[in-house]
Amino acid sequence: MDTYQTAVAHNSVVTADTDTVLSTPFLVLGGTLPTLAGISCRTTPGSACAGILMLGPVTSARLANALMEVPDPAVPIADFAGNQGLRRDFAGERLDPPALAAFRELSTPIWRRLAELPFRAAHEDRAELALLRIAYSRDAAIEASFAADSSLLVDYRLLGRISAARQRLEGLADLDLLRRRFFTRTHACGQCQSARLHAYEACPACGSGNLVDEPIVHHYRCGSQAPESRFADGRLLVCPKCRRELRHFGVDYGKPGIAVVCRGCGAVEDEPVANFACLDCAAATPSADSTPTDWHHYELTEEGLRALHDGRLPRLEIAPLLKGHGRAFSPVEFGLLAGEALRVARRYDRPFALARLTVANIDQLRRELGPVAVDGAFRLAIDTSVGLLRDSDFVTPDGPASMLIGFPETSAALAAKVLDRVKKEVAVVVAAPLEIAVTTAEGEHASTLLDHE
Ligand SMILES: [Zn+2]
Ligand SMILES: [Zn+2]
Ligand SMILES: [Zn+2]
């Protein structure tokens, strides 16, 4: 009974959804929609859109612009023009009733999930939330796969070839909105950065791949050891060092092992090294010098789903970033430490400085560069800053993008010098133009920074 009712209810939901969507027009790119029953083409930009149909060649920039403009960037996409590398849920030869029916069937569960969680996004978070929403609506992980036609060697079919896909997904994973699952490690050519490399065993001396395994011959009498070919003299074995003939295996000489001999330069090695030859520029890169990149699959987390519900990515918070550092304390502990340091400073006439370090332009950068890039820069800046402090210094969060630092046995001038170094190092390490503002105070004045809260 229950099952039957559930099935009916479920079915009616599907029908209702599909009916609504059937009446919703599609956005057409790269052509004009032929007259076809049950499908219409959208004419007003920004109005509701059931999906995108690519009917002719479409550039990735054109599709990206269209996805910025449509109300929901996760609508299903059908490609009828062989647009390689673009995001698409369905590919067909031509737009005819059977293809349309197949695309509809495939899109129905996607439409249902999209309708269950209407899209909303703060303007600056839209592009990243769209990635999460694609994973959510397709009810699928964002899978990495090999792509021989990409110099990166890996792509994410679900997303199509968008710029900096890996960096953006990594950023979302850093925010705990996606969960990583390891896929593979690629290496980059030292010359052109391509990951399309062919690995081979190479001579460490000259880089040649022309190597051969040869038995080592050990002449017992004079102690000479060399690859067998060095002893070969016609059909005889003659020691290259003492010129005596080697007659009896096990009596005159032995073969204690195998050596790798380079036919290029003649070097004899115990272990060849791994080299990469670049399929794009033919340069050879020793594997030890190549830059590795780890690629992952990504799954939407509970926090990722929450971000979709909230319509925005989590805000930057300094407190969780400080947690891992040994010199970081809660505001209460910090207050106690600073109070004690001040008492010592007063009683023994010792210096004590306090400083507030703030990333001043964080909101502006977030709007300009997007939350994921700024979050990464912010983390790096905080790690770098705290890493440069001395063992005796102590820190606590002070607002979302600000921290207080206590400098025992330190004058304000010296603390300012330390913080100057921090600012310089952050500017070197962090690519984004973070503005770091610093206020320092010493002795009795230090308490004003504390009271400021
Ligand atoms: Zn190359
Ligand atoms: Zn060699
Ligand atoms: Zn010899």
Image (tube, rainbow, N blue to C red):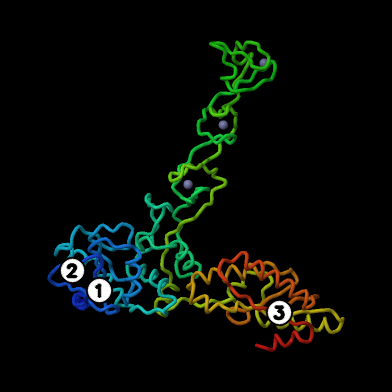
Ranked by sequence position, the earlier of labels 2 and 1 is 2
What is the number of callouts on the image? 3
How far apart in space, not on screen, are marks 2 and 1 (Cα)? 14 Å
Q: Is mark 3 within 8 Å of ligand 1?
A: no
Question: Residue tagged by mark 1?
Answer: 50
Of the two numbered discs 2 and 1 in the rendering, the one whose residue sits closer to the viewer: 2
Res 39 label: none
Quadrant of the image for the C terminus?
A: bottom right
Q: Is mark 1 within 8 Å of ligand 1?
A: no
Local packing at callout 2 (Cα closer than 10 Å; few below 14, some 14-19, many 20+) is: some
Question: Residue tagged by mark 3?
Answer: 355
How far apart in space, not on screen, are marks 2 and 3 (Cα)? 64 Å
Res 33 label: 2
Ranked by sequence position, the earlier of labels 3 and 1 is 1
Local packing at callout 3 (Cα closer than 10 Å; few below 14, some 14-19, many 20+) is: many
Residue 216, quarter of the rendered image: top right
Q: Is residue 9 visible?
A: no
Of the two numbered discs 2 and 3 in the rendering, the one whose residue sits closer to the viewer: 2
Q: Secondary structure at mark 2?
A: loop
Q: Secondary structure at mark 3?
A: strand
